[in-house]
Amino acid sequence: MRSELTYVGRSTAREDAVDKVTGAARYTHDLTPAGCLHTALLVSPHAAASIARIDASAARAIQGVRSVLTGADLDVRLGLYLRDKRILARDVVRYQGEPVAAAAADSLEAARTACNRIRVEYEPIPAVLDPRDALSADAPLVHPDLGTYEHMRGVFFPVAGTNIAHHQVIRVGDVDAALAAADVRVSASFFNPPVQHVAMETHASIAEALPGGRVDIWTSSQSPYTVRHLLSVAFGIPHAAVRVRVPHVGGGFGGKAGLHLEPLAYVLSRAAGGRPVKVVASREEEFNTLPSRQGLRSTIEIGADRDGRLAALRADYLWDAGAYADYGVNIGRAAAYAGAGPYRVPACRIDSRVVYTNKPFGTAFRGFGHLEVLWGVERTIDMLAARLEIDPVELRRRNLLRAGDRTITSELVTEGHGDLIGCLDAVCDRIGWGCPVERPSDARKARGRGVAVLHKAPAMPTHTACAAIIQLDEDGAANVLVSGVDYGQGTYTVLRQIAAEALRLPIEWVRVAWECDTASSPYDWQTVASRFAYMGGNAVIEAAADCLAQIRATAALAFGIDPSRIVCEAGAVYPDGEPEKAMPYSRISLGYTFENGNSVGGPVIGRGCSIATGLTHLDPETGQGLPAQFWTYGAHAVELEVDTETGEIEILRIVTALDAGRVLNPKLAVGQVVGGVVQGLGSALWEGFRFDEAGRLLNRSFVDYKIPTAKDLPGSIEPVFLETPQPGGPYGARGIAEHPMISVPSAIGNALYNALGIDFTDLPLSSERVLAAVRAGGGAG
Amino acid sequence: MMRISMTVNGVRESADVPPGLTLLEFLRDRLHLTGTKEACGIGECGACTVLIDGEPVTSCLVLAVECDGREIHTIEGEAVDGELSELQRAFIEAGAVQCGYCTPGMIMSARGLLLRRPDPTEAEIVEAIAGNLCRCTGYEAILSAIRLAAERSRTGVSDEE
Amino acid sequence: MIGTFEYVSARTVDEVCCRLGDAGPSGRPLAGGTDLLVDIRNGAARPALLVDIKRLPGFDSLRVGPSGEIKIGAGVSLNRIAEEPEIRRRYPGLAASAVAVGTYPVRNRATLVGNLCNASPAADTAPVLLALGAVVTVFGSGGAREIALRDLFASPKRTTLAIGEIVCGVRIPPHGGPVRTAFAKQQRVRGHDLAIASVGGAFFRGSRELRIAIGSCAPTPILLDPIEFGEITADEIVERVAITAARAVSPISDLRATTEYRRAVLPVLIRRVIERLLGPDGGER
């Protein structure tokens, strides 16, 4: 089966790598159009305050300053799902770090000087910093006017007069009765702090307000069409008047998925008479002003019989959205339908609430809530295993979803979903589960093993769509146009392989146009959710088939035979059985000309598209419905060593299995796993925002926000891929980009329990937290 | 303003610069060599790594005026006459490049390493790039690439498909 | 631009001291710049004048005398300290503490003397140098003088230097016998990090004297009183030192660690350092 594919499944090298290793690749940071202005931001020092007075007159007087704006100048409200946000704070600030004013000037120095001259009088008001406090009846309201905000009706349900931006529920069966009748009940509460994406390229956008209400944007973004759409809606400009181009992007991880600095760049340009304006976040602004991953407080209770079969699961997910809802409401939604883990749960009650606080806000982040939710779920499963004295792997085998089961939204699980048990078996086999753990060399260290499973489907609207265009050049080479973004994950390389395969064209003759341009590359929803290889791949396959149909039709005329008798192979066409008559695509790519000069056919342009099919909204009362185009399953097994004197954890081995459906490019797939696992390690062991009592962010630079370095690697990271074909996936593939990160902390937490007999519930598992728990002699940490 | 003169990738560059201009800004904004990146501005991430007289430094914390008379090498000088270096080819082959933003700094740190240690130990390779943050790759492919380049440079065997 | 200031590359030490004397608090010497330029960028320092000392004759010199005395000029980088064969042979603990600072490219610029003059309580190179009885040479309008390293530190990020004075070098005096050194640093991560707590030690075999210094647990690095011991076990030495240390330090709770954690790991670091100092293969590898 494998050998019949020429390109799909090979470790084709990235074409973009040459530009990257030579420094030729240009990112938004590197673009400086003629006359470009530079921007500085003035941000709020307070977590919550009203702006009593703001005076920018001294700023505007500075030589070289071309525009200065405050929230008072901008009566626009933005929001992906819930329009709750201003471009610059207007009347009130809602988080320390929120932009209050901005200046665009000939030089960065002049812009900064201008911001320093802006006078702001704040009147601090009570802030709410903990989502639990935000729920109480007398909590300060972060958005008193929540009830008036436009939002995506039927999908999200903000509760006016509260701090609740959205509440998603799952109601299956009678959970209270099932829990009461259960032989055993286990319950615990968990904490995930907010965490930052830390793409190496910070956010950057350039906007030029052109005559006639047009806008030209260059931006470091994962979703050019979303930028276009939201700008169009916010400012009342026709879509065609907004042009968004995305050059190379230095990492995204979800942080660049929505609308960020683009509106600010645009309004500054408009106010500066149309001069191009570049807004670049410093690293400190990236941490403090740009959004992060929502924090989560969860409480999970599981009831089971004495053989460990789950009878009921109850979960309360309290999402700390920060000051604005952004993607947070959708994460809250996804957390509900995925919130029981990949288990068979007859009775289930989940309440997933997305709640405002006066802190930097949350946005999409790799895993989209699943890492945070599965931290609690997988830890609780292991707690149940410990209580029942059943092996944690065996307990999972008894409860993991299998073909024929239904999920908590009543989705029917099929073979095509993937082999979850196979993933679990693979990691257990490789880690040596069941064999004794080797004794540590030092008596003051402890070793342990843990496993965790993962699942995720793309959390995308029911109408998510993607298109691809393939144009053949004069020389018969193919140029693929898509508007998904390759920000490092390598999808363009995979699409190139798919196009070459489907076009029957040598891969050297295929390229994917690097830069996406809403003026000429066809629509794509967003490059998030691990759905671009899937949907883009399908669109490319369809576009390639369209090209071949055109090629066959014209070749049929050229050879004077029926199109069904035309063979396309290795970039050439010939009548079936007569390969000696082969002519290359270049003879047909712009049409075919007979000897007498007559021309037929025309430029070959193939079109393909892909749209989410069969998805439904979730019932607001019960959560039932079909939210998932496909699921990707996986598992991790971890072996670690803990230093009981310092609390330091050393990950000796981590084995990660994913059912990829079809590994489109092994080297790229391994790259996603190793990169995702290491990013997961960051969430597990070291990362998390810290705030003071006034809600100010304390760790806002690399000095105190630590991400893994080359010295922080586990002893080994071992990726394993299963390939249970995904029905409807391109060559059977399903998405894998987010999944390697999910459940990494869970497996580590479970291994820590195995090593120390201590249940950890709060992340990160810093040395300090671990040591404190060890010294306290066990219990929750 | 102060008059300075330095060699950048073998080319003599003279300019009048204010004392507060960093080497990073000089390279990117004055010489339009945008391959070297800024990702933190405080010497913590390594994205701005270049070589001064063969030694890797974080150029965001070097003033242009401090480089008068010095030899600077940036990522743009790594390939010679359009020919990718052993390091560049190894990075591509080993899958060490994802978003590419850390790549120039990584290659400069690796170049500095191979200049002083053609036969580096694993620990020396890790130490050489531990100051270069990467969020995409998880580092393993980068370490492989450097190992591969060192091996090939030593044995004189070039890459084969 | 990282800041707005004048810059001069000094040619003699007298010139440095004159210019700094004239400029007062708004003049700063510039060596590696890896602390100063960060402070300027963040607005924590606003000097009007930087006096570059890197081209001063002799500032780059690292000399080992026949009796083991080591003189290190103010311009010697931390990487050079870490890689200098004589230092690796004689004082591996010092080499280890040099490597603990920042990252490889930062250490090509950052200097040993700069690390000391920055006077952070977490200065990685301070503990071992204190334990070795290092002495710094201060140059000012009145000429040169030597002070014990312990007398350089006044409070966090403040030295005892007067305006117009700079440190030209640091000297490790000869000890007339074998010395072992060791350094241990507790960090939040394995990658580069500031010390949560650090311990540097020197064991003078001839006089059986143990000197231990502690970083990051007080407003300045702290040198404990020397410990001479006769016939007691290593464990008892460790316990005694740990008790002395616990009384001498005053660790704070900050973003990096709590007082409790610092007090908890300090005896662990002390034990590890002493084990290496007194152990069979002795000192750092």
Image: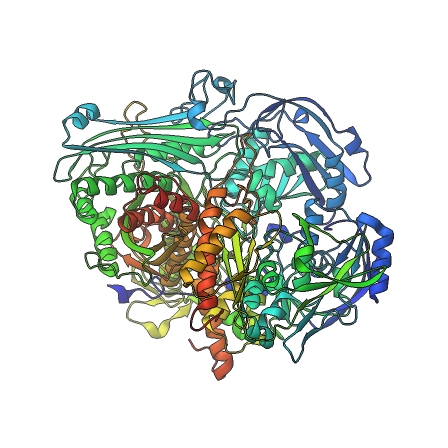
Question: Image point 83% across, 49% down: which residue?
Answer: C24
Q: Nearer the viewer, residue A298 or C16?
A: C16
Residue A588 visible in the displayed image: no
- The way the protein has been coloured in the rendering is rainbow
Residue A751: give x, y in percent of width and height: 29, 50
Horizontal side of residue A442 vs A394, given as left or right? right
Count the marks: 0
In the rendered image, the vertical position of residue A175 relative to residue B146, given as above or below: above
In the drawing, does residue C16 fall left or right of residue A490? right
Quarter holding residue C73: bottom right
Is C63 left, or right, of A185 in this rendering?
right
- Whole-percent x, y for residue A67 in the image: 74, 35
Q: Position of residue A421 (x, y in %)?
A: 20, 50
In the displayed structure image, the side of residue C92 where residue A724 appears, left or right: left
Q: Is residue A96 above or below residue C255?
A: above
- Depth order, front residue of A693/A357: A693
Q: Position of residue A48 (x, y in %)?
A: 58, 25
Q: Is residue B14 visible?
A: yes
